Amino acid sequence: MSTAPVPASTTRYPGGCLQPVLLRGRVDHIDGATGELLHRYTTAHELGGVLLIACKTRRASQCPPCAEVYRADTYQLIRAGLSGGKGIPDTVATHPCVFTTLTAPSFGPVHLHREKDGRILRCRPRRHSRTCPHGRRMSCATRHSRDDILLGEPLCPDCYNYTGSVLFNACAPELWRRFAITLRRALARQAGLTNKALAAQVRVSYAKVAEYQRRGVVHFHAIIRLDGPAGPTTAPPSWATLALLTAAIDQAARTVHLDIPAAPHLPARTLTWGRELDTRPITTTGKLTDNKVAAYVAKYATKAAECTGTLDRRVTPADQLDGLPIREHARRLIAECLRLSKLPGLADLRLAAWAHMLGFRGHFSTKSRTYSITLGALRADRAAYQREQAIAAGLMPDLAADSTLVLAQWHFAGRGLPLTTAPGLVNPPPGDQRDGSHREGVGDVA
Ligand SMILES: [Zn+2]
Ligand SMILES: [Zn+2]
Ligand SMILES: [Zn+2]
């Protein structure tokens, strides 16, 4: 995570955003019946003549204050699905619910941090270590600390399966989709029901987050919960137990696969989840509590692939791969994305566009429709609260929504903090203000 200091002068901006969008324009409130102008807001009276809109990124490496808002919202959303609140009944806490981690398989040995009872273990001790065809020893007796830069680096980069790693990332969202379908079928089979009969009695709800491992592959952490047919407001049938859910997850994770057909310079292969599967119940007390899980998922929702030492932006054709300031392992993964992107049959994976993400182009946090409330609902609540506050403070007119027309006219006026208020932070040069990208309509940007 970036630790760029937040200039004190930014605290008055929306959420302290470091890279706000600047807008110039006005909003008129007009009486729908008489056409009378009731109220006008114009940015002419704002500092620098512009209104600042928070960038609202989820990524902590790009804008820490906005990512913090995203993290807090995600925490509330995840927690409501575990213990209730925000309109979700607290009886949801009694539904069978687990936290499961679906890992990627091995693509070759990498340096590891291992711990047991608070002691750091040796990385890969082997009494009779073999040597790879490139003459490198396939063992490592080092006790790597948590922040060792060697973590995730292959013992032999020339043996490492870069093709498999990149294809796994690219296909992980599809593998998850198949897992979710197979899980429902496995539940039906264990309960002795048809798929249709299962759907009439049980709904499987989930929320998941993708996390990059240091070796450059994603794995998924998922909260999986069994509800009654209408979601969290209805109780699941008594036969839908924690044990049944755990067994069905295990079965689904071990059977799901995805066949990639052969292409020129690329043999056919079958992608599966890794052998390591960790499924644990979530409870209100004990080791894995609702608060812990919500904090964990929310933390990973604000991250991308930073820990792998890759690029924080897309790779462009102008980039010289050799000259990019990235880890050697990440460079090879990116190079493999670019190589595979040119092969016929793999165009759908869009590996060149997602090379900086080492092939993964999925969403970082997703949830099923009935898991909990939505981020949109949380944001709408906040906007309504801010509007009430603004009206109470006399900053906005309190007009009847059904009889008032709101006419907004906005012009894009740049990106970043205005130079007049935050010296040192970059504004686009006058020629790059793209003032012509002009948005007009009925609405409100608050
Ligand atoms: Zn921001
Ligand atoms: Zn090692
Ligand atoms: Zn080797």
Image (cartoon, rainbow, N blue to C red):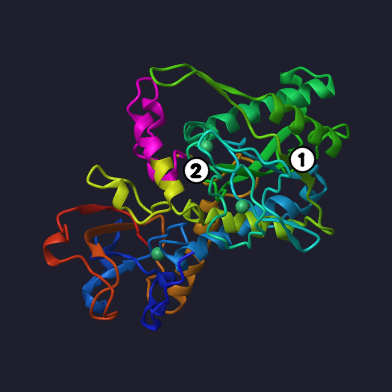
Crowding near the residue tagged with mark 1, few <14, some 14–19, many ≥20 C-alpha atoms within 10 Å = some
Q: Residue furthest bottom?
A: 8
Which residue is drawn at the image coordinates 34% and 47% (left, top)? Answer: 314
Q: Residue furthest left?
A: 431
Is 256 above or below relative to 310?
above
Tell me the residue that label 1 is attached to.
234
Q: Nearer the viewer, residue 254 or 41?
A: 254
Q: Is residue 27 left or right of residue 230?
A: left
Crowding near the residue tagged with mark 2, few <14, some 14–19, many ≥20 C-alpha atoms within 10 Å = few
Q: Give, as a single range, the part of the protein colored magenta.
A: 335-360
x and y percent of residue 327 in the render? 43, 53
For disc 1, does the CB lie below 8 Å from ligand 1? no
Residue 23 position by quadrant: bottom left
Identity, as a three-letter code, of the amino acid under mark 2: His
Q: Mark 1 or mark 2, which has the lower sequence index?
A: 1
- Residue 363's label in the rendered image is 2
Can residue 231 be seen at all in this image of the molecule?
yes
x and y percent of residue 284 in the render? 81, 57
